[in-house]
Image (cartoon, coloured by chain):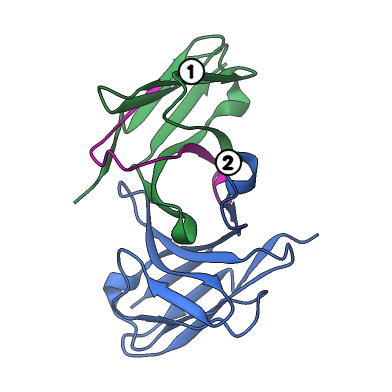
Amino acid sequence: QQQVKQSPQSLIVQKGGISIINCAYENTAFDYFPWYQQFPGKGPALLIAIRPDVSEKKEGRFTISFNKSAKQFSLHIMDSQPGDSATYFCAARGEAAGNKLTFGGGTRVLVKP
Amino acid sequence: NAGVTQTPKFQVLKTGQSMTLQCAQDMNHEYMSWYRQDPGMGLRLIHYSVGAGITDQGEVPNGYNVSRSTTEDFPLRLLSAAPSQTSVYFCASSYAPTGSLAGETQYFGPGTRLLVL
């Protein structure tokens, strides 16, 4: 039972384009929503995170949009670069104890030059 | 700081063998976790610890044991390896949540790729 559903599974975008990855969750108790970036052969690394009391957060070319009523959040990568080619995971935390994260299935992004 | 380190990087086991995956962190983090990563399934929590001497089960704990005798180390033991445990294993650590977003970041190690034949 996957509590965080992520789409699409893969994405190809041209350099300079916009990459959009969507996630939907079921548990209304989730209180923290991070996005992780993973390069081949490496561990995931935090990219950007948001709490449900904020509708949008922007850090450089990366923006999280959050819709609490729809229980959806998305990652937008503006001006996508070949160096952004990686796998992206959304996640959600249901309880602070243990800082336990529930991850989406991941999206493999390929940015073509 | 070395951050989160994991050994070995790669391991091949035969069904029924046991082994320990090592994880260490030098950031004085209270919380440590083990995840497994399988294609299309993201990362799933196996076990976690909120401090030395305290561990609890995650989403997929069967077939794995953990202990936490020190703040720095959090080994994961496979008792009797099965082909279904073929996966990439990641250890992560973080501070106890403080309310600040930055303080809740989980730092992941480079992973251990395990193949069970």
- Label 2, residues with CA under 10 Å away: few <14, some 14-19, many ≥20: some
Q: Nearer the viewer, residue B95 or B67?
A: B95
Residue placed at 32% from the left, 90% from the top? B16
- Marks 2 and 1, how far apart in space? 17 Å
> How far across and how far down the image is residue B25, in percent?
68, 67
Q: Which image quadrant is residue B80 in? A: bottom left
Local crowd size for mark 1, using a 10 Å CA cut-off: few (<14), some (14–19), many (≥20): some
Residue highlighted by disc 2: A46
User: Which residue: 31% across, 50% down?
Assistant: B41
Q: Residue at x 56, y 81 (%)?
A: B68
Q: Secondary structure at mark 2?
A: strand
Identify the residue at the far right of this view: B1
**What shade does chain A have?**
green
Residue A56, disc? 1
The quadrant of the picture occupied by the C terminus of chain A is top right
Residue, x 64% and y 46% (percent of image)?
B103
Badge 1 sits on which subunit? A
Left or right position of A30 against A63? left
**B88 in the magenta segment:** no
Is residue A32 shown in magenta? Answer: yes
Q: Is residue A111 above or below residue B72?
A: above
